[in-house]
Image (tube, rainbow, N blue to C red):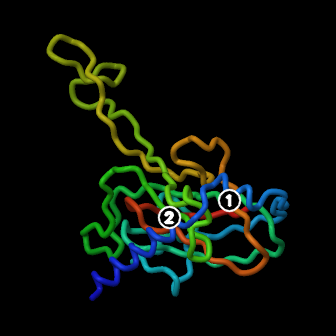
Amino acid sequence: EEEKSSANSKLEEIGELLNSNDYAEYRLIHKGTPAGEEEIVLAGGDFDVEKTTAKVFKDKYLGSEEDVVLIPEVGDVSWTFEVKKSGNFHIEIVYAPVVSYDGDGDGEADLVSNTATIKRALLLDGTYPFKQSRYLELSRVWSDEMGGEGSNDRGFVLDNDGNEIKPGKLEAPEWRTVKASDSTGYIVDPFLFYIEEGVHTLTLAEVQEVCAIKEIRVF
């Protein structure tokens, strides 16, 4: 029964996405509308419990002073916010990749990354504002694996002929800030979302990978 419900939900999601506007069409609909005049900051840890379906963890992470929300690959996370005056807003996300996280302290990781690109869909009030909001990508951070046994003074390991070997890659998770934008790069400028006066729900829906969210800014 649960699998049937999940399948129906996915079919509804696909239908909704097919019926949503392209970003260019969306902007034409809202042509001439004013820029937003306020800045709304949503703390990651202040997610809406009732509207969140993911089995999240609320904790300090990567040196954060406040609790953030650590999100599994499956399920959605929502925040509620209020706009005092209708307008066009950018949406900025402060996030970090999660390599491995033990949320209950039992020595076993509750969240484990497969090192793929982090992907999320962004919904406002339960719907996609436009097709491209289904495909947000949050990049990961990598560094060269330098040093170790047999390395030279530049940190490179040498082969039998004394040649420097190309180093492997290590993930170096850090807090990153990104504006919601087109993952294909076809649309150069960050997305503008027209949000009317009133109370709204912003949702980051499951697509791929685990991650942590420290803050979302609507401005």
Q: Residue 174's x, y, as percent?
A: 49, 50
At numbered mark 1, what does the secondary structure look like: helix, strand or loop? Answer: helix
- Identify the amino acid type marked 2: Leu
Marking on residue 187: none
Q: Residue 100's x, y, as percent?
A: 33, 60
For the C terminus, the image quarter is: bottom right
Q: Residue at x 26, y 74 (%)?
A: 106
Q: Is residue 180 above or below residue 206?
A: above
Q: Residue 29's x, y, as percent?
A: 74, 61
Asked if the residue under mark 2 is in contact with the one under mark 1, i.e. CB atoms within 8 Å, the reply is: no
* 159 horizontally vs 123: left or right: left
* 121 horizontally vs 1: left or right: right
According to the picture, the residue beneath numbered tag 2 turns out to be 18
According to the picture, the residue beneath numbered tag 1 turns out to be 26
User: Which image quadrant is residue 151 in?
Assistant: top left
Q: Residue at x 47, y 61 (%)?
A: 120
Judged from this view, the residue extending furthest toward the top is 161
The earlier-in-sequence mark between 1 and 2 is 2
Q: Residue 217's x, y, as percent?
A: 67, 62
Alpha-carbon span between mark 1 and mark 2? 14 Å
User: Few, some or many C-alpha atoms within 10 Å of disc 2 (few <14, some 14-19, many ≥20)?
Assistant: few
- Identify the amino acid type marked 1: Tyr
Between 56 and 118, the residue placed more toward the observer is 118
